[in-house]
Image (cartoon, rainbow, N blue to C red):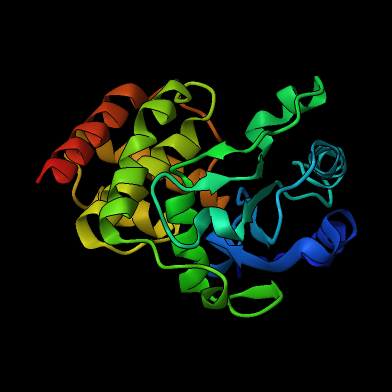
């Protein structure tokens, strides 16, 4: 059975640092799309009333470095913070107040503090939050957030593809699974878990590319070791990018 996340410490951390400005905290991602897998992040969105200070963002980063990670008793945490009036009423691109993810750990350990700015990736995040309807603190997310128009969701997930491809060598499994999910969402309008999206996409891939996506799914589920030297990963990824481009253009 997939693991269920422990989030009380994250909610308490947000309450301590963000105080009365904190309006709601919401679980999304793998935990709400079938349950956490061995390599899943704990994905959390926090909605605040007022912009954060640099000191608040610095403290959040410092504390998340202690509780997020890979290892005994740890889970990687992806925390997104939005100011409510930066995303409601909805406009594109939405504004992200703070983002912590393990792929940025080296930057954080060197002293970088996340800064506010526009972030198209918020479109799928907010969509998943609203679909999951899994508050950890505060009212249901629909009381604080506007729905994301389908056209903006499509535009946002395609906008992130070039940056994904830059990370292919360093984050192979996640890039392949995310590309599969982008394709699935473009084609069906729904957001699947990464393993479900990989299963959906594998049935539509040419035979030569199926082992690559099958390996990515197997590693994600904890059934296989992470190794890529025996497979043509780039050709599979480039095929996925082509079908994504064709799907968005259609």
Residue 214: which quarter of the image?
A: top left
Is 189 above or below relative to 134? Answer: above
- Measuring 44% from the left and 41% from the top, which residue is drawn there? 216
- Measuring 36% from the left and 44% from the top, which residue is drawn there? 156
Is 77 above or below relative to 215? Answer: below
Question: In this rendering, would 114 be left or right of 232?
Answer: right
Q: Residue furthest left?
A: 250
- Measuring 51% from the left and 29% from the top, which residue is drawn there? 227
**How many numbered circles are shown?**
0
- Measuring 33% from the left and 47% from the top, which residue is drawn there? 182
Is 37 above or below relative to 24? Answer: above
Residue 30 in the image: state x and y as whole percent. 55, 60
Q: Is residue 34 visible?
A: no
Quarter holding the N terminus is bottom right
Q: As rendered, which of 212 and 173 lies closer to the eye?
A: 173
Q: Is residue 235 visible?
A: yes
Residue 169 in the image: state x and y as whole percent. 48, 21
Residue 85: which quarter of the image?
A: bottom right
Residue 74 in the image: state x and y as whole percent. 80, 49
Q: As rendered, which of 172 and 102 lies closer to the eye?
A: 102
Question: In this rendering, would 135 be left or right of 52?
Answer: left
Is 138 above or below relative to 84? Answer: below
Question: In this rendering, would 105 be left or right of 116?
Answer: right
Residue 45: which quarter of the image?
A: bottom right
């Amino acid at each position: 059975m997939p693991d269920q996340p422990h989030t009380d410490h994250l909610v308490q951390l947000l309450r301590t640092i963000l105080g009365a400005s904190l309006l709601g905290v919401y679980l999304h991602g793998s935990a709400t799309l079938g349950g956490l897998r061995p390599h899943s992040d704990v994905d959390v969105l926090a909605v605040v009333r007022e912009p954060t200070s640099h000191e608040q963002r610095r403290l959040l980063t410092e504390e998340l470095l202690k509780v997020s990670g890979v290892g005994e008793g740890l889970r990687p945490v992806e925390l997104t913070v939005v100011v409510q009036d930066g995303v409601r009423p909805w406009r594109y691109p939405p504004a992200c107040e703070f983002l912590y993810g393990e792929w940025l750990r080296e930057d954080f350990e060197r002293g970088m503090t996340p800064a506010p700015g526009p972030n198209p990736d918020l479109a799928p995040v907010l969509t998943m939050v609203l679909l999951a309807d899994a508050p950890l603190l505060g009212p249901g997310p629909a009381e604080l957030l506007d729905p994301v128009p389908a056209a903006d969701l499509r535009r946002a997930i395609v906008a992130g593809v070039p940056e994904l491809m830059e990370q292919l060598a360093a984050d192979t499994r996640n890039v392949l699974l995310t590309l599969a999910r982008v394709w699935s969402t473009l084609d069906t309008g729904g957001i699947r878990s990464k393993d479900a999206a990989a299963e959906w996409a594998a049935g539509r891939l040419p035979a030569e590319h199926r082992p690559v996506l099958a390996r990515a799914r197997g590693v994600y589920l904890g059934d296989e070791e992470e190794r890529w030297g025996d497979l043509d990963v780039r050709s599979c990824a480039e095929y996925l990018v082509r079908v994504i481009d064709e799907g968005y253009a259609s």
